[in-house]
Image: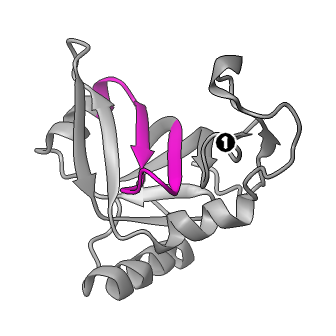
């Protein structure tokens, strides 16, 4: 697993013109705002796919570090079972007004460097009062974010 914290490319999302999304970059969300939302979030809604194709969602604790979402999920949890079969997933925050949706692939978070593991554990301790470790990391491919619809929708792409 790589630990690249590169900044993604910012564009407008692929939303039908009828929704009134501007064509230019005026009022687009900044990546720093997205990172702030993901870092400070207490709960993350995780969406995975059952082996038969049905969607599954569950709220989870997590830690956004170096442009990856580290989260728990023992082998007995439904989302862990799903991700081991199909690593495609989505995570989103709780707000429908200050929206952040992360699309990507989950990887097992085995053998993390000690300094990264310490950062995850410290973040868990601050947010939740206890460290829990991370069994998975969501590696983002695309992030959608907005604060005022239809003016601010922004897509971030990890090339």
- The residue drawn where x is 24% and y is 39% is 57
Front residue of 33 and 75: 33
Q: Is residue 7 left or right of residue 36?
A: right
Which quadrant, please, contains the C terminus?
top right
Question: What residue is pinned by disc 1?
Answer: 153
User: What secondary structure is marked by label 1?
Assistant: loop
- Residue 61, compared with residue 121, is above or below; it is above
Dividing the picture into quadrants, the one containing residue 10 is top right
- The residue drawn where x is 40% and y is 56% is 95
Classify mark 1: residues with Cα within 10 Å, few (<14), some (14-19) or many (20+): many
Q: Position of residue 54 (x, y in %)?
A: 22, 18
Q: Specify start and end residues of the magenta stretch as a single range.
A: 83-103
Count the labels in the image: 1
Front residue of 79 and 4: 79
Furthest-top residue in this view: 52
Q: Is residue 12 left or right of residue 121?
A: right
Residue 21 inside the magenta-drawn segment: no
Q: Position of residue 94 (x, y in %)?
A: 36, 56
Dividing the picture into quadrants, the one containing residue 43 is bottom left
């Amino acid at each position: 697993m790589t630990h690249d914290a590169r900044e993604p490319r910012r564009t407008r999302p692929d939303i039908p013109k009828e929704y009134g999304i501007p064509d230019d970059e005026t009022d687009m969300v900044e990546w720093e705002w997205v990172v702030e939302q993901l870092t400070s979030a207490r709960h993350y809604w995780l969406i995975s796919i059952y082996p038969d194709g049905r969607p599954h969602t569950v709220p989870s604790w997590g830690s956004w570090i170096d442009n990856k979402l580290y989260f728990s999920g023992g082998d007995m949890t439904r989302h862990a079972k799903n991700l081991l079969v199909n690593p495609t997933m989505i995570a989103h925050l709780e707000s429908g007004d200050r929206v952040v949706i992360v699309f990507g692939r989950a990887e097992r978070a085995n053998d993390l460097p000690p300094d990264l593991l310490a950062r995850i554990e410290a973040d868990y301790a601050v947010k939740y009062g206890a460290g829990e470790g991370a069994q998975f990391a969501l590696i983002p491919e695309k992030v959608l974010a907005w604060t005022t619809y239809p003016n601010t929708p922004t897509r971030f792409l990890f090339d």
